[in-house]
Image (cartoon, rainbow, N blue to C red):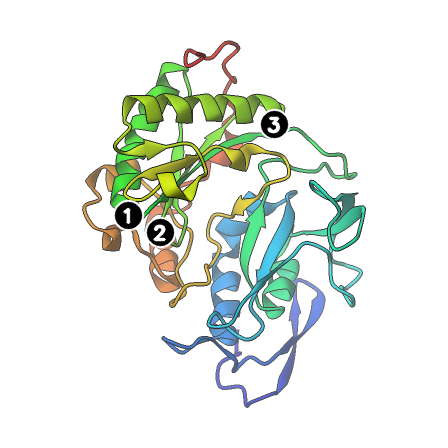
């Protein structure tokens, strides 16, 4: 789309799938270290949309917005902002945990199509975070259809150690007949996803916690499952809490607010097993577009695979 070369402060009206959008501040530099602009971010999200949209469709989105670029503090935005177009799908749900900004409910945006994705990106919503559950076409809340493990390294551990833990975790899942797919967090960690039949978040959280506990007991020099930061230096936190229905995880193919436009990138198990340096699994927007051209969507099986959740997990204490 012809958004490059726009003068400072200019607005551009464009039509996407019969929706008219006004795009602003396209020359704004969002990643100052590399000169990556808002126009480039919009271009990335437009081009990656065919593989990104299926993973966020039907899932209420929490945005992390950086209107002044990634060098300044961003903020999470759950509630649809004032002026949201009527054609943007929203759904009002109880606020997670306690009240959100003094509200008992939150009017979430649901990104089901390209115009909504570009509208959100125009708000400098660099990061897209979604829960492990969906809403139905009439707004009914469904049970989680994904089990997720967020592997977070405590320095000096890196994604290299996360890959070791991911392989160990894959074996425990296999014992219970479950297959997993991996993606980078786009920052320093790794995430494993397990598509399942719809199951309560109490069951998914309990199961994930027990697997994390088992790994920590078997590999105390490598793994922790408690959140306490004092326990984490040099180890990998297996964060099982992302399965709580109130929690969200960064979406596949979402940009991240780092010093460069890195992306939460699906990876193969061969890449996980062969990772020897953090640089091996660091991908920026241009890299990811090339990977999709070459490999397609490596997480596409999450959209069609439904695995039976273990009735009595073999990992039970």
Which of the 4 quarters of the picture holds residue 138?
A: top right
Q: Is residue 289 left or right of residue 128?
A: left
Give the mark, 3 or 1, whose residue is nearer the N terminus.
1
Q: Which mark is residue 158?
A: 1
| Residue that carries the numbered disc 3 in the rendered image | 201
Q: Position of residue 192 (x, y in %)?
A: 41, 36
Q: Are marks 1 and 2 in contact (CB under 8 Å)?
A: yes
- Disc 3 to disc 2, how far (Cα)? 26 Å
Whether residue 21 appears in this view of the structure is yes
* Image position of 221 with respect to 71: above or below: above
Front of the two marks 3 and 1: 1
Instruction: Please rate how many residues cluster around mark 3, counting C-alpha atoms within 10 Å: few if below 14, some from 14 to 19, many from 20.
Output: many
- Disc 1 to disc 2, how far (Cα)? 7 Å
Q: Position of residue 160 (x, y in %)?
A: 25, 44
Extreme front residue here?
230
Name the residue at 39% across, 50% down: 265
Instruction: Please rate how many residues cluster around mark 2, counting C-alpha atoms within 10 Å: few if below 14, some from 14 to 19, many from 20.
Output: some
- Disc 3 to disc 1, how far (Cα)? 29 Å
- Quarter of the image containing the C terminus? top left
* Image position of 29 with respect to 50: above or below: below
Q: Is residue 264 left or right of residue 129?
A: left
| Residue that carries the numbered disc 2 in the rendered image | 188
Give the mark, 1 or 2, whose residue is nearer the N terminus.
1
Q: Position of residue 30 (x, y in %)?
A: 48, 74
Q: Position of residue 78 (x, y in %)?
A: 68, 54
Q: Is residue 282 left or right of residue 97?
A: left
Figure label count: 3
* Image position of 21 with respect to 6: above or below: above
């Amino acid at each position: 789309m012809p958004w490059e070369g726009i003068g400072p402060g200019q607005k551009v009206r464009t039509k996407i799938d019969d929706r008219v959008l006004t795009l602003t501040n396209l020359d704004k530099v969002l990643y100052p270290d590399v000169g990556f602009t808002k126009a480039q971010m919009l271009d990335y999200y437009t081009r990656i949309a065919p593989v990104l949209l299926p993973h966020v469709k039907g899932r209420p989105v929490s945005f992390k917005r950086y209107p002044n670029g990634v060098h300044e503090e961003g903020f999470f935005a759950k509630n649809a902002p004032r002026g949201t177009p009527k054609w943007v799908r929203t759904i009002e749900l109880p606020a997670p945990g306690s009240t959100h900004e003094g509200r008992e409910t939150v009017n979430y945006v649901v990104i089901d199509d390209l115009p909504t994705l570009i509208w959100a990106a125009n708000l400098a919503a660099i990061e897209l975070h979604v829960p492990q559950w969906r809403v139905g076409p009439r707004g009914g809340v469904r049970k989680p259809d994904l089990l997720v493990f967020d592997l977070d390294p405590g320095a000096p551990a890196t994604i290299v150690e996360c890959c070791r833990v991911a392989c160990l975790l894959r074996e425990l899942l296999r014992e219970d007949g479950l297959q997993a797919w991996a993606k980078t967090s786009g920052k320093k960690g790794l995430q494993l996803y397990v598509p399942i039949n719809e199951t309560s978040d109490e069951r998914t959280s309990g199961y994930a916690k027990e697997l994390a506990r088992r790994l920590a007991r078997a590999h105390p020099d490598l793994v922790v499952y408690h959140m306490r930061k004092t326990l984490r230096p040099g180890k990998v936190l297996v964060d099982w809490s992302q399965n709580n229905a109130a929690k969200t995880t960064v979406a596949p193919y979402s940009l991240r607010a780092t010093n460069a436009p890195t992306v939460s990138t699906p990876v193969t198990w061969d890449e996980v097993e062969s990772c020897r340096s953090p640089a091996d699994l660091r991908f920026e927007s241009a890299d990811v577009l090339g990977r999709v051209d070459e490999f397609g969507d490596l997480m596409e099986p999450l959209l069609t695979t439904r695995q039976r959740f273990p009735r009595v997990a073999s990992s039970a204490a």
